[in-house]
Image (cartoon, rainbow, N blue to C red):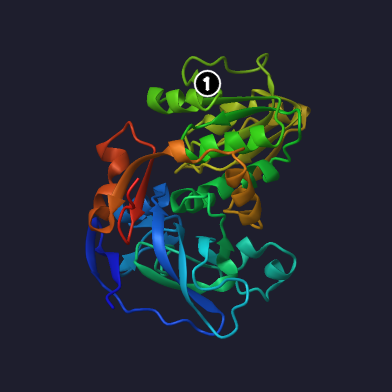
Amino acid sequence: MANLAAVMPALGTIRVQEVPVPEPSAGEAIVRIEAVGICGSDTAYYRVGYIGDWKVEGPIILGHEAAGTVVATGSEVTNVAVGDRVAIEPGTPCRNCEECLVGRYHLCPDFVFLATPPYDGALVQSLAIDSRNLFVIPDSMSFEAAALCEPLSVGLWACRRAGLLPGDRVRVTGAGPVGILAAQVARAEGAADVVISDISDFRLALAAKLGFRTEKVGEIPEGPGHEDADVLLECSGAPGALAQGLWRLRNGGRAAMVGLPKEDVTLPLSRLNVKEISVSLVNRYAHTWPTAIALVSSGRVDVEPLVTHRFELADAESALTLAVDVPDSMKAVVYPNGIPAH
């Protein structure tokens, strides 16, 4: 049986080609990949070949937002069975180091993460992975929604890092997929008010359809005297967004920085100090998949409207260039084994 993958043999090039059919080790499962969401990190690796210290130095398969069907299991696998529909957590820790043992497995120094060099990702028809990374989804949940549990997990972790509490007033900067999902998590967790800001009318319109107050960047009051939020979720990575957002926080406010700008950030700490504002950084997530699945399956978080374009594996390159080719777009999903009939 062939196993086709969208391989990036060189910068800015995708070729669909056969790769080895995987065989499970004792603790692994083989998953037929049904849906893969395209992330900004995938596009960055495709276009420039690196993100921070992670550099593409050879052929790589991209894609880490994935879901599929278990088709085989190793001899020691007990948590999933053949036929299970699963969401895939893309990071595999060593599970034995200090970080893993205290529960911070996402900070494991030997973390193996799908589509982070040098490791291949999920734009492939069949994938072998540690079965402990697999979470069974209900029959009512689509593979598309299950794949989006990955960016939803980023939003969940941002809210946890910010210490979000019921009744908090929340500002979200950036109405991309993670920003809108973080906003939905904040609302589901009891935020009294959530407002989303962005420069894109298209993205703000989508946020508004999901029931959020929206503000256009450039039309928002800035500086002291405009404090109206308890929590800031910075999801844009835009230069200055964090500093501007911090000014909107009340005394004791908390911020989580999800979007990382390309250059260093300057903060007016001497003036923000008197407000005792806390700023937390966000590096992926931990222990989020069960909650993400519950939020989606219960209807408290709606991920489906974020998917604006769908592609076959043969068109994976178009999915990776979507944000540039179609500015009024949100999330592309690739179906390695074919787009199902709707």
> What residue would you read off at disc 1?
214
Q: On the image, which quarter does residue 93 sit in?
A: bottom right
The residue at 24%/53% (across/down) is 315
**x, y percentage for residue 179?**
52, 36
Which amino acid type corresponds to the residue marked 1 in the rendered image? Thr
Position of 227 with respect to 338 (left or right) is right
- Of 251 and 13, nearer the camera is 13
Q: What residue do we see at 48% from left, 32% from top? A: 175
Residue 198 rendering spot, x and y as whole percentages: 47, 26
Where's the C terminus, which quadrant?
Answer: top left
Question: Where is 193 relative to 287, above or below?
Answer: above
Disc 1 element: strand
Left or right relative to 337: residue 41: right
Between residue 108 and residue 298, name the one nearer to us: 298
Residue 132 drawn above or below residue 261: below
Q: Quadrant of the N terminus?
A: bottom left
**How many tags in the picture?**
1
Q: Residues within 10 Å of mark 1 (few under 14, many from 20)?
A: many
Res 281 visible: no
The answer to whether residue 329 is above or below residue 294 is above
